[in-house]
């Protein structure tokens, strides 16, 4: 621990310089030896004299070229294509300058000498630099087995101090804190419980290499997520496993310990702070109201229930067809909000009599309709089920809401409803048409909220990637260019609640999902954040776009306008005119066809949703 990073790097550079001097000398002699078929005695005396007499110049040329191309500055533990390219350029340039020098000095050598010299020099240089990765890997494995896990902590504050204290005082942990990183120059060079702050974030890669770091702990609970994202962006190239301390509240409660550290999640890479919403506007229309959530046990529905429960409704009615999901959210809410008037019901939104009975009995004032089949490939193979559950379920639930005087009905929709290429998206577009039509004829304010993918939801790609990584790979990506918009579940639900507060009836609210994320980049980052090398430890395989899957998603159709709201992240799409009489005739035909299990109802869906284009995968990205 007393060795500084600079001293270690200095020794390493001196070793490389000495190695390169021997390598260029050996390459010069071997080039002639190979030219004369591996018989040294056959080499012409004047060629040997030329090479030996010019050797000091050859060494000097090599050292200057290698230094200019930073072959003594790179961190070879993380060498990649860029470093390989520099080695080839350096070898070629050294050969060229050496050849020019020999010619100007009047030194004669065989023409083939230059080609063999270049090949050998590049090979020797490549071997010295890239073999370091191999031997360092063996060293790290032996070190891990003998000494445990070497850890670096990013952040030299109170959180780091608490973690160090626990690790140093534990008899059971096999971790060794080797160094600290902090951007505060006042802390750099100082020690916390004997552990040195070796520098700022620019020293992370060097420190990982010098101290053979296996895991990096990010202990910066009070900094913005944008700062965390920048640090993760550096750390993910080190092949170390990353763990992060969740939040500032642990510092306040004095709860900081190793068990509080979690794996770095993809949302840490989004590079933005969590979206803030106007909680007052939510409280104003949720508090002391009877609220019903369909699909209340699902990923979106359950988060709706959590946030609604936190805003003191007079009663919360949770409806779900899946008893396990319903039971889980029931137990969670009962424990967290014991005073909440909670009703949990098992029911299908397809069942007209059951839904009418529930609405008649409980008379909800606000309804969030989250019940739906959402898995695109599964719905492609079972289109009638998508129609029954999504379209007819929305129709029946909306009818029950209108008949009992519900004040607001909020449909949870999806960006896949825009120019849909799959049954799921087309079914949700029909749902939007239903609620926009109902809004014209009933006092209930019917609205829809449309957003993209949410991190961690049922069917999300993130849990799948994590399972594949834990199994050793491969990680499967459908297409190298596929992109998606992402938002966390709590963020999306908070915006849904606020959009409901803005609702006047008939709107399609569109959530701003930020910048799109390339799924291939997401997969690579997850592999790196798990401590593995992409395509070395864990491979990525492309499986092809699934049925109905787009390369990209849209949040607004071309014919829709876009109006702003008080929240810059919530917009309103202008309602599209619908021939209502024709629409309900088509809807009845669709209901009959789905109930009769017709082989292909895509034609009927296309009649209702002209923008539906089955099998299209979207534009090239």
Image (spheres, helix red, strand yellow):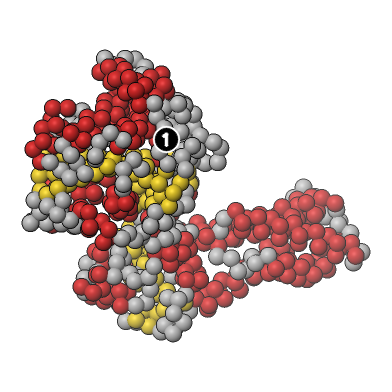
Q: Position of residue 60 (x, y in %)?
A: 75, 71
Residue at left offset 42%, top offset 76%: 182
Q: Is residue 115 left or right of residue 20?
A: right
Q: Nearer the viewer, residue 86 or 269?
A: 269
Residue 512 visible (yes or no): no
Residue at left offset 46%, top offset 46%: 562
Residue 430 visible (yes or no): yes
Quadrant position of residue 154:
bottom left
Q: Quadrant of the N terminus?
A: bottom left
Residue at left offset 49%, top offset 37%: 559
Q: Position of residue 67 (x, y in %)?
A: 68, 69
Q: Secondary structure at mark 1?
A: loop
| Residue tagged 1 | 576
Q: Is residue 221 left or right of residue 169?
A: right
Residue at left offset 39%, top offset 54%: 565
**Does residue 564 sit above or below 56 in this rendering?**
above
């Amino acid at each position: 621990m007393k060795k500084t990073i600079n001293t270690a790097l200095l020794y390493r550079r001196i070793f490389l310089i000495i190695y390169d001097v021997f390598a260029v000398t050996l390459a010069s002699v071997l080039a002639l030896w190979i030219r004369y078929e591996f018989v040294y005695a056959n080499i012409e005396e004047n060629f040997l004299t030329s090479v030996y007499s010019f050797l000091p110049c050859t060494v000097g040329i090599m050292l200057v070229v290698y230094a200019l191309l930073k072959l003594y500055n790179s961190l070879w533990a993380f060498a990649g294509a860029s470093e390989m390219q520099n080695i080839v350029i350096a070898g070629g340039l050294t050969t060229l300058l050496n050849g020019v020098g020999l010619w100007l000095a009047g030194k004669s050598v065989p023409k083939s000498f230059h080609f063999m010299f270049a090949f050998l020099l590049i090979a020797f240089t490549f071997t010295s630099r890239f073999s370091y990765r191999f031997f360092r890997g063996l060293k790290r494995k032996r070190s891990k087995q003998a000494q445990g896990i070497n850890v670096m902590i990013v952040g030299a504050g109170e959180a780091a101090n608490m973690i160090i204290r626990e690790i140093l005082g534990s008899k059971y942990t096999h971790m060794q804190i080797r160094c600290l990183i902090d951007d505060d120059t006042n802390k750099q060079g100082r020690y916390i419980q004997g552990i040195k702050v070796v520098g700022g974030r620019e020293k992370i890669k060097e420190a990982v290499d010098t101290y053979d770091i296996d895991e990096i702990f990010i202990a910066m609970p009070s900094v913005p997520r944008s700062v965390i994202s920048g640090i993760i962006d550096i750390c993910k190239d080190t092949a170390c496993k990353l763990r992060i301390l969740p939040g500032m509240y642990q510092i306040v409660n004095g709860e900081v310990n190793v068990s509080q550290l979690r794996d770095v999640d993809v949302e840490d890479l989004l590079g933005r702070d969590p979206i803030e919403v106007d909680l007052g506007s939510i409280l104003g229309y949720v508090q002391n109201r009877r609220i019903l959530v369909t699909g209340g046990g699902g990923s979106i529905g359950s988060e709706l229930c959590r946030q609604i429960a936190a805003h003191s409704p007079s009663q919360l009615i949770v409806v779900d067809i899946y008893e396990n999901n319903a039971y889980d959210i029931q137990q969670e809410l009962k424990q967290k909000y014991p005073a909440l008037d909670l009703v949990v019901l098992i029911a299908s939104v397809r069942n007209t009599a059951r839904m009418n009975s529930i609405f008649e009995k409980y008379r909800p004032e606000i309804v969030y309709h989250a019940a739906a089949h959402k898995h695109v490939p599964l719905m492609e193979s079972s289109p009638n089920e998508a129609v029954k559950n999504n379209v007819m379920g929305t129709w029946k639930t909306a009818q029950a809401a209108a008949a009992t005087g519900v004040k607001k009905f909020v449909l949870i929709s999806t960006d896949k409803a825009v120019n849909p290429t799959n049954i799921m998206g087309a079914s949700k577009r029909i749902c939007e048409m239903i609620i926009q039509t109902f809004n014209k004829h009933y006092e209930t304010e019917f609205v829809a909220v449309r957003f993209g993918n949410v991190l961690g939801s049922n069917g999300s790609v993130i849990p799948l990637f994590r399972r594949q990584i834990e199994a050793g790979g491969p990680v499967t990506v459908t297409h190298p260019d596929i992109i998606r918009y992402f938002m966390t579940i709590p963020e999306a639900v908070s915006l849904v609640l606020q959009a409901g507060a803005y609702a006047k009836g008939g709107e399609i609210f569109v959530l701003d999902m930020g910048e799109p994320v390339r799924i291939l980049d997401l997969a690579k980052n997850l592999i790196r954040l798990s401590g593995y090398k992409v395509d070395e430890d864990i491979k990525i395989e492309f499986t092809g776009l699934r049925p109905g899957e787009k390369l990209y998603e849209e949040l607004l159709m071309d014919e829709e306008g876009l109006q702003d709201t008080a929240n810059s992240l919530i917009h309103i799409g202008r309602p599209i005119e619908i021939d209502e009489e024709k629409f309900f005739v088509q809807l009845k035909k669709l209901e009959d066809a789905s109930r009769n299990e017709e082989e292909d109802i895509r034609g009927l869906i296309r009649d209702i949703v002209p923008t539906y284009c089955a099998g299209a995968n979207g534009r090239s990205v």
